[in-house]
Each structure stands twice: as C-alpha cells, then as structure tokens.
Image (spheres, coloured by chain):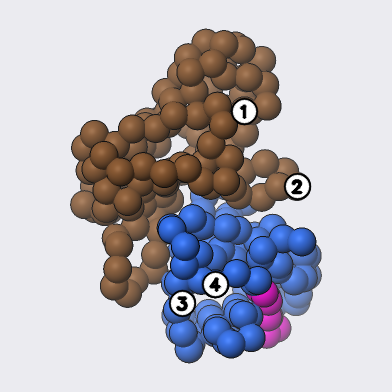
Chain colours: A blue, B brown
C-alpha cells in the first residue's frame, strides 16, 4: 500500500464548478505539500501545510493531522486550472519527501 | 528572479557514458533535492541535501551520486547510465524552517539513455 494515496486519479469538471481533491497518508509527517504540474511538465508549489487551513486566491488547502487527511479545493474552476495536482508528505523521520500519484484535472469551458 | 536552474533540459546519451546534470539556486536555500518522474510511478526522491557537505539518500538512490560543495549548487552525477535511468528529472530547493510555499522546482531535465 502506498504511503500517500490521492483520489480521484482523474477528474473532469465544467468551468465554474467547485473541485475537491483528497490526499490520505499513513506515516508521521512534519508537513504536507500540494503541487501543481502543468501540461508542459513544470512543477509549482501551491501550499505547505502543517496544520489547519490555507487559502490563496481560489485555492484552499486543509489538513487534519489526527485523521491523516488533506484536501485541496478549487472554487469557481477555470480551464487554466487543468493540470496534475500532486500531494507530497515530508516525513518526521529525516527529510524525505514521498509523493502521491497525482490527480489529473481537466476543466472544460 | 528567484529560481532553480537545471541544465541541460534535454539529453540523449549512450549506456555507460558518465554524465552530470547541474542544478543551481539563487535563493540561499539550505535544502536541495533531486527527483525522478516516471509514468505510472510518479515522482520519487533520489537524494537530498540539508546543507553544504550534508547529503542523504532518498527512495531511489542506486546508480546516482551527488555532491554539495557550495550552497547554491547540487549536481546529479550518473557514473554509468543505463536505459532504466531514462526519466524526467527535477531539482528543487527550499528554505529550512518557517512558513512559505515550500519547494521551488527547476524546469526539469528529460534524459534518454540508449
């Protein structure tokens, strides 16, 4: 079983819809990261979380440490949000980063 | 502009011919790391460095070497590349401690070993 599981693997939405991507992990962590990978391959950090909730524009990320679960929400989705969204956890033992398999999001106009 | 610079962007090489992929950051970040990305396997960490002269293995270090002689540079060395090292490679850096977005990634290096 993977230490980091994301769901769904693929998600198709209509422009304007509210989107949720989930991430569950099974190890002790010091931080959780949400990343965005564009079709061209470049990777951008969206959030780093160790507790609670963060918001940046239309993106909101939450984490529940007790339940070992995080969610990434996109409000009023837009075709330019189409990308792969990747959850990664930084383990408490050392500084290794372990990644989920990613969620391919497609937002249609 | 704050960035992580990887070179080359694309590289085709032959089995056994030593190569180095360079990574440089201009943000004075202490932490640097290398990852490979493969279809169906996602991103996996190869090596990381917490500071100058401090390096440690990630999940898939076999066949790779790294060095951290200066804070800004973290080259990835393939002493004897093999076809199973064909992959998309990313370098990243971050400031240890504190808040912020986390990692800054390079643009990637697509390596093909024939």
Q: Tell whether A26 sits left or right of B24.
A: right
Q: Determine which of the numbered discs, if any, sits on residue A49 in the image.
A: 3
Q: Are discs 4 and 1 both within one chain?
A: no
Q: Is residue A105 visible?
A: no
Q: Is residue A21 magenta?
A: yes
Q: Is residue B91 above or below residue B93?
A: above
Q: Secondary structure at mark 2?
A: loop
Q: CA distance from mark 3 to mark 1?
A: 32 Å
> Mark 2 — on which chain does it sit?
B
Q: Which residue is mark 4?
A: A28
Rendering quarter of residue A10: bottom right
Asked if labels 1 and 4 touch by Cβ distance under 8 angstroms, the answer is no
Asked if labels 2 and 3 touch by Cβ distance under 8 angstroms, the answer is no
Q: Tell whether A79 sits left or right of A12.
A: left
Q: Residues within 10 Å of mark 2 (few under 14, many from 20)?
A: few
- Closer to the camera, A10 or A93? A93
Q: Determine which of the numbered discs, if any, sits on residue B40 in the image.
A: 2
Q: CA distance from mark 4 to mark 2?
A: 25 Å
> Mark 4 — on which chain does it sit?
A
> Mark 1 — on which chain does it sit?
B
Dominant SS of magenta comes to strand
Tell me what residue is drawn at x 41 percent, y 44 percent.
B56
Stretch in magenta = A17-24
Tell me what residue is drawn at x 51 percent, y 57 percent.
A97
Q: Is residue A96 magenta?
A: no
Q: CA distance from mark 4 to mark 1?
A: 30 Å
């Amino acid at each position: 079983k993977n230490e980091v599981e994301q769901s769904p693997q693929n998600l198709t939405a209509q422009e304007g819809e509210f989107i949720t991507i989930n991430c569950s992990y099974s190890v002790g962590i010091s931080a959780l990261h949400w990343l965005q990978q564009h079709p061209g391959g470049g990777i951008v950090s969206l959030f780093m979380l160790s507790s609670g909730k963060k918001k940046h524009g239309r993106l909101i990320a939450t984490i529940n440490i007790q339940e070992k679960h995080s969610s990434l929400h996109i409000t009023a989705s837009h075709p330019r949000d189409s990308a792969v969204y990747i959850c990664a956890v930084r383990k408490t033992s050392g500084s290794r980063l372990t990644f989920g398999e990613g969620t391919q999001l497609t937002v249609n106009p | 502009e704050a960035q992580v610079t990887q070179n080359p962007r694309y590289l085709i090489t032959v089995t056994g011919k030593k190569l180095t992929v360079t990574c440089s950051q201009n943000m004075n970040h202490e932490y640097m790391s290398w990852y490979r990305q493969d279809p169906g396997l996602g991103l996996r960490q190869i090596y990381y460095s917490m500071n100058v002269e401090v390096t440690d293995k990630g999940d898939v270090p076999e066949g790779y070497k790294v060095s951290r002689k200066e804070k800004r540079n973290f080259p990835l060395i393939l002493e004897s590349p093999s076809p199973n090292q064909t992959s998309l490679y990313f370098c990243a850096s971050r400031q240890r401690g504190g808040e912020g977005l986390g990692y800054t990634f390079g643009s990637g290096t697509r390596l093909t070993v024939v």
